[in-house]
Image (tube, rainbow, N blue to C red):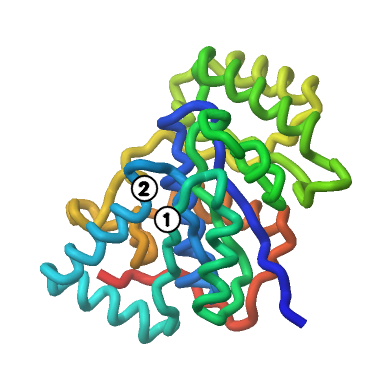
Amino acid sequence: MKKEPLFIAFASQKGGVGKTAFTVLTAGILRYQRGYNVAVVDCDPPQHSIGLMRDRDLECVKENDSLKMALYRQYKQKPQKAYPIIKSEPENAVENFYRYMREQETEFDIVLFDLPCAFRYMGMIRTLALMHHIFIPLKADDAVMQSTLQFASVIRKELVSHEDYPLKGIHLFWNMIDKREDKGTFEAWNKTICDSKLHLMTTCVPETKRYNREASNMRGGIFRSTLLLPDNRQVKGSGLMELVDEICGIIGLAEKQGESPMTNLM
């Protein structure tokens, strides 16, 4: 009997809040560190930014001996092939994933969907409804927050716990936290979230440029890559591992036996 994979998505009404970065980073940790069979469905046409990131990563590894060695060491430590990136229109995302799975004759533990700014595409609501969990990054900006909370409230009311849909919950988390921001601003928004009966995760991700560090910019170590784990020197204080651990707890993804911590590969 074939098992069904878990479907999770990072989604938002607003661009620039980090959903693509978190899709890539979460997929990498679950695949390359924890050994799960992972797929990513890139549903953000026409650019398909995660697909383009994979192309950049492959080109950088091809041209850089240090990256070749880092990839070799990572593979020796835990031999996991690169997770597939399936390009799709958002309305056909789930169908295209299952088509890929049948063609490859393989099974997946978890599938991450990188969705565009929602409601711009026909069939987008249906795709959201077919997820098991939706994770929504928050940014302390009034316009972003108003739009995001409206989006989250509609999804919770219309899709969560609907008997025809598998969607179990939507989960909000703070991203791009600026320590200089007035604490009263967050307290006020947290109260609004609570009053709206929305689930706010405990992890808060700080404002940091490390989330933009790709293989094409080696200075300071790689953080965001579709092929490599983030440099562990960059992980501390990023909130990334805390976020992934909390996500795993929410979706019921148990730690695999023999999981090894990140090590410096560069």
What residue do we see at 51% from left, 65% from top?
Answer: 39
Alpha-carbon neighbours of circle 1 within 10 Å: few (<14), some, or many (≥20)?
A: many
Which picture quadrant has residue 173? top right
Q: CA distance from mark 1 to mark 2?
A: 7 Å
What residue do we see at 72% from left, 79% from top?
Answer: 2
What residue do we see at 46% from left, 52% from top?
Answer: 88
User: Circle 2 sits in a helix, a strand or a loop, which is it?
Assistant: loop
Which picture quadrant has residue 244? bottom right
Residue 125's disc is: none
- Provide the residue designation for mark 1: 87
Residue 238 drawn at (x, y percent): 44, 47
Instruction: Judge left or right: residue 216 versus residue 253.
Output: left
Q: Nearer the viewer, residue 28 or 109?
A: 109
Number of numbered tags placed on the structure image: 2
Residue 48's disc is: 2
Q: Amino acid at mark 1?
A: Lys
Residue 75 drawn at (x, y percent): 36, 81
Mark 1–mark 2 CB contact (< 8 Å): yes
User: Circle 1 sits in a helix, a strand or a loop, which is it?
Assistant: strand
Instruction: Judge left or right: residue 226 versus residue 157.
Output: left
Check the image and report above or below for 13 versus 63. above
Q: Amino acid at mark 2?
A: His
Residue 29 drawn at (x, y percent): 49, 64
